[in-house]
Structures are given as C-alpha cells and as structure tokens.
Image (tube, rainbow, N blue to C red):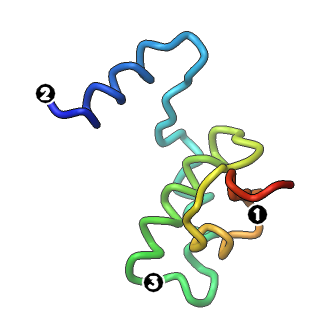
Amino acid sequence: MDEAWRQVKVWASSPWVRMLAETENFLSVLGRIAAQPRISGGRVHDARVAAICMANGVSELLTRDRDFFHFPELRVRDPLIAA
C-alpha cells in the first residue's frame, strides 16, 4: 500500500478531521466562482475545491498553492508564512 493512501486512511479515521464533499448548494457556489474572469483550464478544478470548502463552511484554507488566491470569497493562507 502506498504511503499517500495510508495517510488518507489516518486522516479519515481521526476524530478531529472532517472529510469534505459536495453539498446541496455546491453547484450554486461553484457557478458563482467559475463565472469569474480567468477561471478556466486547471483553475476550474481549483474552483471546485474552493466551492467545496465554502459550501462546507470552511473559514480558512491552508495551502501553498497560489492559485487559490484567485478566489477572494475564500480566506486562504500559506501555512509556511507567518501571519
């Protein structure tokens, strides 16, 4: 079994982790985000991830991926840069 899969299993079994998924209002959130200029190609997948976060009430996304800063509706922070 590969290490990435083992890590996902650890996260999924943790009582402190909540796995996110599409909600009933996911498509309306995604539609609003995807309608913005410059959201095409690979950014559509990033928009999907952002919409899942927003639809699930995530208050802040910690990521090193700068593309998420294209979604001002979602608070994004690089965890390796001091706040």
Asked whether disc 1 touches disc 3, contact meaning CB atoms under 8 Å apart, the reply is no
In percent of width and height, residue 49 lies at: 51, 55
Type of amino acid under label 2: Met
In the picture of the structure, the residue carrying the numbered disc 2 is 1
User: Of label 1 and label 3, which has the lower sequence position?
Assistant: 3
In the picture of the structure, the residue carrying the numbered disc 1 is 73
| Residue under the point 67% across and 50% down | 61
In what quadrant of the picture does the C terminus appear?
bottom right
Residue that sits furthest to the right in the current view:
83
4 up-or-down from 71: above or below: above
| Residue under the point 53% across and 66% down | 47
In percent of width and height, residue 79 lies at: 69, 51
In percent of width and height, residue 12 lies at: 42, 20
Task: Tell me the mark number nearer the camera, choosing from 2 and 1.
Answer: 2
Q: CA distance from mark 3 to mark 2?
A: 35 Å
Q: Quadrant of residue 71?
A: bottom right
**Which structural element holds mark 2?**
loop
**Which structural element holds mark 1?**
loop
3 up-or-down from 11: above or below: below
Asked whether disc 2 touches disc 1, contact meaning CB atoms under 8 Å apart, the reply is no
Q: In this orientation, which residue lies closer to the viewer: 78 or 50?
A: 78
Q: Quadrant of residue 45?
A: bottom left
In percent of width and height, residue 40 lies at: 45, 84
**Which structural element holds mark 3?**
loop
Q: Is residue 72 left or right of residue 7?
A: right
Type of amino acid under label 3: Ser
In the picture of the structure, the residue carrying the numbered disc 3 is 40
User: Of label 3 and label 2, which has the lower sequence position?
Assistant: 2
Badge 1 crowding class, 10 Å Cα cut-off, few under 14, some 14 to 19, many 20 or more, is: few
